[in-house]
Amino acid sequence: MSEITLRRTRYVLAGTWPTEHADDITAGGWAVVNAPRPLAGRMTWEGPFICGVFYAAGPYDELAKRWRADDATLLVPVTPAEVVAKMRALVRDRGYDFAEVAAEVPEQLRMWAEDQGLPWDHGWLTTVTG
């Protein structure tokens, strides 16, 4: 991967990419970025607002310098199970019991997830084990 890093990374739910682009993105191992302005990429599209409505996908090494100049945000897909695992680790590292936090102050989990740039749905706790 390129030595160039983008200023921000945001996690999005896996399966977020439009169906007409998803197979090409996966097959190419391409990165996806989002910004408030149009971006360069092997494919581009407009979609729901995350850090803007403009999206681009392509090889990171080829496009990272330009994406950084355009202040793009790197989007990293995660599954609900991965998010819950990350949150369990975060809560444990802060010295709390995950089950207690989830039961007594569930809103705190959402706030911590947002602080980490993670999507959050409290309902995942009933569908994800571990």
Image: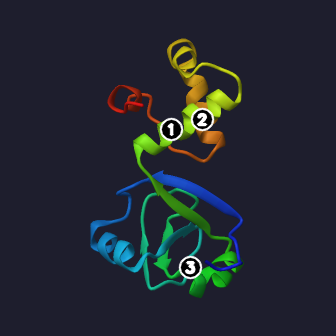
| Residue type indicated by callout 2 | Ala
Expressed as whole percent of the image width and height from the top left, the position of residue 11 reads 53, 53
Circle 2 Cα neighbour tier, 10 Å, few/some/many (<14 / 14–19 / ≥20):
some
Give the image quarter of residue 67. Answer: bottom right
- Mark 1 to mark 3 CA distance (whole Å): 27 Å
Q: Position of residue 81 (x, y in %)?
A: 41, 41
Mark 3 and mark 2 lie on one chain; the one further toward the N terminus is 3
Write the residue at 57% across / 18% down. Answer: 101
| SS state under label 2 | helix
Image point (59%, 83%), residue name: 61
Q: How many angstroms separate mark 3 from mark 2 (CA)?
A: 29 Å
Distance from disc 1 to disc 2, alpha carbons, whole Å, reads: 6 Å
Q: Are marks 1 and 3 in contact (CB under 8 Å)?
A: no
Which quarter of the rendered picture does the C terminus lie within?
top left
Q: Say whether residue 50 is left or right of residue 6.
A: left
Q: Which mark is residue 60?
A: 3
Badge 3 amino acid: Tyr
Count neighbours of disc 3 (C-alpha within 10 A) and say few if under 14, some if 14 to 19, many if 20 or more: many
Q: Amino acid at mark 1?
A: Ala
Circles 1, 2 touching at the beta carbon (< 8 Å): yes
Residue receiving disc 2: 89
Q: Tell us which disc is closer to us: 3 or 2.
A: 2
Helix, strand or loop status at disc 3: helix
Where is residue 1 shown, x and y percent of the image? 61, 77
Nearer to the camera, 48 or 94:
94
Asked if 41 appears above or below 100 in the picture, the reply is below
Seen in the picture, residue 72 relative to 115 is either above or below; the reply is below
User: N-terminal of the two: label 1 or label 3?
Assistant: 3
**Label annotation for residue 85:** 1
